[in-house]
Image: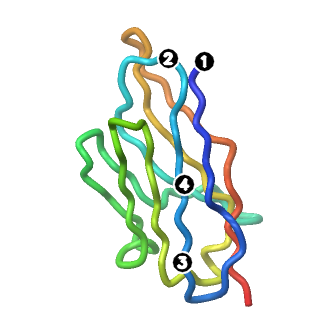
Amino acid sequence: QVQLVESGGGLVQPGGSLKLSCVVTGTFSRIRAMGWYRQAPGRQREVVALISSSGAPNYADSAKGRFTISRDNTKNTMDLQMNSLQPEDTAVYYCNAGIDITGSLSQYWGQGTLVTVSA
């Protein structure tokens, strides 16, 4: 059974930094594109950053210049380094991955980790 587990959320002051991590566990053939999404209270889930299987990143405008997405294919992990955090970054952050299991591609989500930016 494939699972995505996030970690690294918490409370941080405006201007501070946090690093989120996601690890994929279970039995599968290959992890394709991965990404971080977030959902703030009362709002729809939105993409924050995506990363291809080869490591090419793509950022939402809100994340450009502040966040860095990376992955380690040898460890089946993905990180999101978040700098210069602002109150509007407060949300539950979710890890997403497209995973091949015996030739069938499916999208998987983590359970989410809460990031709160507040003084």
Residue that mark 4 sits on: 37
Measure the alpha-carbon separation of dots 3 and 4. 17 Å
Q: Secondary structure at mark 2?
A: loop
> The residue under label 3 is which amino acid type?
Ser
Q: Are marks 2 and 4 in contact (CB under 8 Å)?
A: no
Measure the alpha-carbon separation of dots 3 and 1. 33 Å
| Mark carried by residue 17 | 3
Nearest to N terminus: mark 2 or mark 3: 3
Quarter-of-image position of residue 28? top left
Q: Secondary structure at mark 1?
A: loop
Nearest to N terminus: mark 1 or mark 2: 1
> In terms of depth relative to the viewer, which is nearer, 73 or 64?
73
> The residue under label 1 is which amino acid type?
Gln
Q: Residue at x 37, y 74 (%)?
A: 64
| Mark carried by residue 1 | 1
Measure the alpha-carbon separation of dots 1 and 2. 6 Å
Indicate left or right for 18 with 32 as reference.
Answer: right
Binning the other alpha carbons within 10 Å of mark 3 as few (below 14), some (14 to 19) or many (20 upward) gives some
Quarter-of-image position of residue 115? bottom right
Measure the alpha-carbon separation of dots 2 and 3. 33 Å
Q: How far across and how far down the image is residue 52, in percent?
A: 30, 44
> The residue under label 4 is which amino acid type?
Tyr
Measure the alpha-carbon separation of dots 4 and 1. 22 Å
Binning the other alpha carbons within 10 Å of mark 4 as few (below 14), some (14 to 19) or many (20 upward) gives some
Q: Residue at x 55, y 47 (%)?
A: 95
Q: Quadrant of the C terminus?
A: bottom right
Q: Residue at x 42, y 36 (%)?
A: 76
Q: How far across and how far down the image is residue 61, in percent?
A: 40, 72
Q: Are marks 2 and 3 in contact (CB under 8 Å)?
A: no
Indicate left or right for 97 with 108 as reference.
Answer: left
Nearest to N terminus: mark 3 or mark 4: 3
In the current view of this chain or complex, which residue is farthest to the top?
Answer: 102
